[in-house]
Amino acid sequence: MILVIDDDSGVRSSLQFMLKRAGYAVQVVPGPREAMEMVRAEAPDLILMDMNFTLSTSGEEGLTLLKQVKLFRPDVPVILMTAWGSIELAVMGMRAGAFDFVTKPWNNAALLQRIETALELRHVVRNGGDASAVGKLERSGIIGQSKALTEVLDVVARIAPTNASVLVTGESGTGKELIAEAIHANSQHAGKPFVKVNLGGISQSLFESEMFGHRKGAFTDAVADRQGRFELADGGTIFLDEIGELDLSCQVKLLRVLQDQTFEPLGDSHPRKVNVRVVSATNADLRAMVSARTFREDLFYRINLITIKLPALRERREDIPLLARYFADRQAEQNALPRVEFSPEALDFLSRLPYPGNIRELKNLVERTVLMCGKKRLEASDFELGNLAQDTSARPASNASPSFAGMTLDEIERQTILQALSSHRNNLTQVASALGISRAALYRRLEKYDIKIND
C-alpha cells in the first residue's frame, strides 16, 4: 500500500487516481496527525508526502513528520514532494532519511519510475541477494575473483535489474566504466543504447548542445539538427563519467533533466521525454565538494541512490595474475604473437608493485612488456625493463622547453599547454596532472586558446 500525505485535496485525488491506474493500493490523508495514525495502524510499502502543510510554509512540519515516520517505520521508503523553488527542503529531507524527491508539478512517468525503483530496492534489502546472482552476472570484461571484487559484483547483481541511479566511485584506473557497462548489461535496459559521456571533456559553452542536442540555426555553427546524448540514450543507460568535473551552472541543467527526464534541445521550445537509467562515476570526493559548495547537494542526492566504491588494485592483489594473463593474451592475439607464459617470479614481481594508476597501469605495463620482449615466457627482469621504459617515457625530453622570451602571459600559457600535450601524447588526464589543474580547467584553456586535439 502507498500512503499519500498532502493537504491539497486536488493533489491527493490526482495521485490516488494515477497510482490506482498503475495497480497500486492507495491511502490518502491530509496531514501529519492522520498520517501517523495510519503509519501506526499498518506499515505502508511506500510513503509519498508533501513537505509543506497548511500550518507551515517553511517545511518544518514536513521535516518533523518525516523524522517521526523514519523513527517508527525506518525501512519504509519516503519520497518527498516539493516545488522547484523549495528544493532546499527536499535536500534537508534527504539528509533526514528520505529515499528520493520529486518537484511539483511532477511528471507522471518519472514519478511512477521512482516509486517502482524504491519498492524494488526495498525488496532487495529485505530479501538479500540471490546466491547464484554473481555467477550468472554478465561481467562485461571484469576480471578477478578476490573478495573485494566479489562484494562489488554482488551489489551490481542485486541493483542492476532496478532503475536506481548509481554512483560509481574509486581511484583513476579502477574500472568504473566496466562496472557501468555491467550494470547496463544486467538491467532491463540491456540491448538498448549504452551512451558514455565524459563530462570532464565537455566545455561549459557546449554542454547543452552535447547533452540535449540542438536544432539547425540555434547558434552560428548549428548547420544541421543534432541529437543530444540523452536522446541517443533513450530506452537505455547513460553513463556520466567524471561528473565531479562538471561546472556548477551545468550541474543545474543536468539536475533538471534527471528530475523529470525531460529536456528541450537548443532552439526548440518543445520538451522531449526520455526513459534513461543514469550511472555516474567519479574519482573525486563529492561529499567534500558539496561541503566546499563546488558540487550541488541536490544533484548529489539525485545521482547516488546507490553508491558502489571500487577497490584499488593494491586492495585486490590476488587478482593481479588473472589480470596480467588476460592482458597478455589479448595483446598477443591482437598482434598475431604466440601466447605468453609468466614465470612464478614474474607474477610475484607484478603482484608487489604499488600501481598508483591501478588496473590501467598494470595493463599498460603488461602490454608494453609483451611487445618489447617478444618472448613466449616472461621473467621478472622483463617487467623491470618494461617498468623502466614506462617511467622513462613519462619524462619530457630535456630540450623540449620552448623559449618564452618576449612572450605575453597568455602566449606562455598556450605554449606550456602545447608542450605538455606533446610530452604526454595528448593524454588529457596526464596533461592536467602535469600542469597541476583539473581536467575541466584544462578544457577551458583548450577552448580559450583554440587548441584542437586530434584523437
Image (spheres, rainbow, N blue to C red):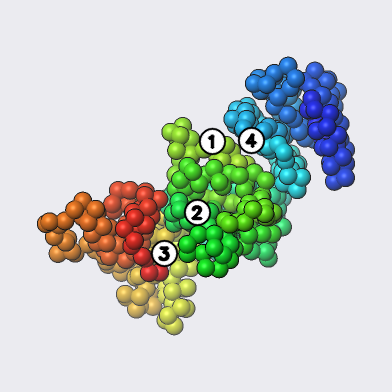
Q: Residue at x 46, y 34 (%)?
A: 293
Assess disc 2: are there few (<14), some (14-19) or many (≥20) residues with their C-alpha within 10 Å of its C-alpha: many
> In the image shown, does 269 or 124 lie closer to the viewer?
269
Q: Position of residue 408 (x, y in %)?
A: 19, 53
Q: Amino acid at mark 4?
A: Trp
In three-dimensional space, the C-alpha distance between marks 4 and 2, rounded to whole angstroms, equals 22 Å
In three-dimensional space, the C-alpha distance between marks 4 and 1, rounded to whole angstroms, equals 14 Å
186 relative to 58, above or below: below
Q: Nearer the viewer, mark 4 or mark 1?
A: 4
Label 4 close to label 3 by CB (< 8 Å):
no
Place residue 72 in its image quadrant: top right
Asked whether, in this view, residue 341 is left or right of residue 12, the answer is left
Q: Which residue is mark 3?
A: 363
Asked whether, in this view, residue 321 is left or right of residue 373, the answer is right
Q: Which residue is mark 4?
A: 84
* Res. 300 in view: yes
Assess disc 3: are there few (<14), some (14-19) or many (≥20) residues with their C-alpha within 10 Å of its C-alpha: many
